[in-house]
Structure formats: structure tokens, C-alpha cells
């Protein structure tokens, strides 16, 4: 049986993870040893999260990275229709 890709794991779990208080993003990355992991971007010290996220998602390690709050630079009227940034 083939292992799910990090992207497919993120796709399945992102909706539930992104509604958690303090979680502002989710993406795939690699660990120092070159193995894949799932990163949760959080906007505060992990010790202050109301509940800690899982340490594994479908076998991939979950890494917490503290970041500033992520906000859009501007409202893009094409954002909902898959529009792109102006060149």
C-alpha cells in the first residue's frame, strides 16, 4: 500500500486544523534528515495553545512554527475566482 503524499494529508486535515485557535497556516516541508513533515504555522507560543495539535498526521511528523499573524496585503476581487496577482 502506498503512503499518502504530504499534500493529500494536508488537504484532508487542513479544514479541521485551520479552525483551531492559534493555527494560521499549514504546509509541507522537510526535516533535517530529508524526510517529509507537515508544518503548522501558529501565532503564539505553543504552550499557550488551548489544545496541542497531533504529533503525527497519517505518519508524517507535525512541526510547530511560531509566526506573526498572517493578514492579506489587500482585498483582491479575483481571490475567490482563482485570480492571480498583477504582473
Image: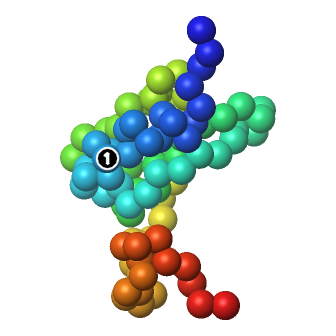
Give the quarter of the image for residue 30: top right
Q: Position of residue 70 (x, y in %)?
A: 42, 73
Q: How is the image coloured?
A: rainbow
Q: Is residue 57 above or below residue 25?
A: above
Asked if one can make out residue 33 in the rendered structure from this viewpoint, the answer is: yes
Asked if one can make out residue 47 in the rendered structure from this viewpoint, the answer is: no
Q: Nearer the viewer, residue 87 or 41?
A: 87
At a point 59% along the width and 31% down the height, the residue shown is: 5
Give the quarter of the image for residue 44: bottom left
**Residue assigned mark 1:** 15
Q: Nearer the viewer, residue 86 or 70?
A: 86
Q: Element under label 1?
A: helix
Q: Nearer the viewer, residue 67 or 25?
A: 25
Viewed as shown, does residue 16 lie left or right of 58? left
| Location of the C terminus (image quadrant) | bottom right
At a point 62% along the width and 15% down the height, the residue shown is: 2
Q: Residue furthest left?
A: 50
Give the mark count: 1
Q: Residue furthest top?
A: 1
| Location of the N terminus (image quadrant) | top right
Q: Position of residue 4 (x, y in %)?
A: 56, 25
Q: Is residue 77 above or below residue 25?
A: below
Q: Is residue 20 above or below residue 30?
A: below
Q: Position of residue 27 (x, y in %)?
A: 54, 50
Q: Position of residue 28 (x, y in %)?
A: 59, 45
User: How would you rate the neighbour count of disc 1 (Cα within 10 Å): few for under 14, some for 14-19, many for 20 or more?
Assistant: few
At a point 64% along the width and 46% down the height, the residue shown is: 29
At a point 51% along the width and 36% down the height, the residue shown is: 8
Q: Nearer the viewer, residue 25 or 75?
A: 75
Amino acid at each position: 500500500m502506498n503512503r499518502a503524499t504530504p499534500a493529500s494529508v494536508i488537504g484532508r486535515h487542513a479544514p479541521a486544523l485551520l479552525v483551531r485557535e492559534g493555527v494560521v497556516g499549514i504546509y509541507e516541508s522537510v526535516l533535517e534528515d530529508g524526510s517529509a513533515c507537515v508544518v503548522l504555522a501558529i501565532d503564539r507560543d505553543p504552550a499557550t495553545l488551548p489544545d496541542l495539535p497531533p504529533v503525527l498526521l497519517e505518519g508524517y511528523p507535525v512541526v510547530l512554527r511560531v509566526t506573526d499573524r498572517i493578514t492579506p496585503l489587500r482585498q483582491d476581487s479575483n481571490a475567490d475566482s482563482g485570480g492571480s496577482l498583477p504582473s
